[in-house]
Amino acid sequence: MRLKNKVAVVTGGASGFGEGIVRKFVAEGAQVLIADLDLPRALDVAASVGAAACALKVDVAKAADLRLMLETAELHFGRIDILVNNAGVTHLPQPLEDVSEDDFDRVVAINMKAIYLAMREAVPRFKANPPDANGIRGVVLNIASTAGVSPRPRLSWYNASKGWVITATRANAVELAPFGIRVVALNPVAGETPLLKSFLGEDTPEMRAKFLSSIPLGRFSRPDDLGHAACFLCSDEASMITGVCMEVDGGRCI
């Protein structure tokens, strides 16, 4: 029960890494708002984990939706302790000059601007929280990527967006530390999630084998891998950790 009495909001929490984080958080005692564009799937996940979770349809690219997301969490659970910025997209692997402006704008809106919009709403709420025994008032966890550490060809603008997330995490951590707000990130390698096909270009045994050959531990990240790591970084056990962007990548970035 490492997250007992904590309230978390998880964007993109209805599938993939986000779902893994939701399930682990609830198992460890947290109450969770699952924010996702796919409301039926979010409702299914909420129902499967019980009364500790609720679901809300949220488009993270819209400021009004993110404001409603945090207001709903406060209304439903009384406060917010943890914000997980997990929602993300990619463009298909292709030469950087061939990525359409619409695809580029979508990557920027969801991978980057959504974090700005969510932080703009969450930080004042965290600053108003009473500090815990360690002086912490809130935790922000961003899901970045190994793509922001060790970029892959033909995913240039996705790589750049995740590099931005890493830098934003560190910058925010420094600024918010005096207020008792920790900001951390996870860098997963490609995983068994709905985005895998987009990363690979085509999901074939040959493409999987080629990608897996670059991961020393020999497998993709799983949702439960991210759930375990997220639970630690958002728990009181990590109260002295901020600005860290931790690889969960089987050695991919070594």
Image (tube, rainbow, N blue to C red):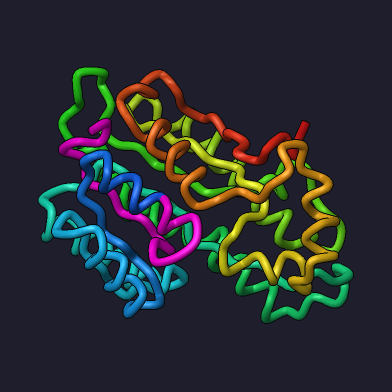
Can see residue 163? no
> Where is residue 250 shown, x and y percent of the image?
68, 38
The answer to whether 220 appears left or right of 223 in the picture is right
53 displayed left or right of 138: left
Instruction: Give the quarter of the image for residue 170.
Output: top right
x and y, in percent, of residue 72 in the image: 19, 64
Q: Residue 247: image x %, image y %?
A: 62, 36
Q: Is residue 37 magenta?
A: no
Name the residue rendered at 40%, 18% in the picture. 240
Between 166 and 17, the residue placed more toward the observer is 17
* Magenta residues, start to end: 1-20
| Whether residue 113 is situated above or below residue 61 in the rendered picture | above
- Which quadrant of the figure contains the C terminus? top right
Foreground residue among 11 and 243? 11
Q: Quadrant of the N terminus?
A: top left
Left or right, 233 with respect to 9, comes to right
Q: Residue at x 51, y 43 (%)?
A: 225
Up the image or down, 32 lies above or below 14; here it is above
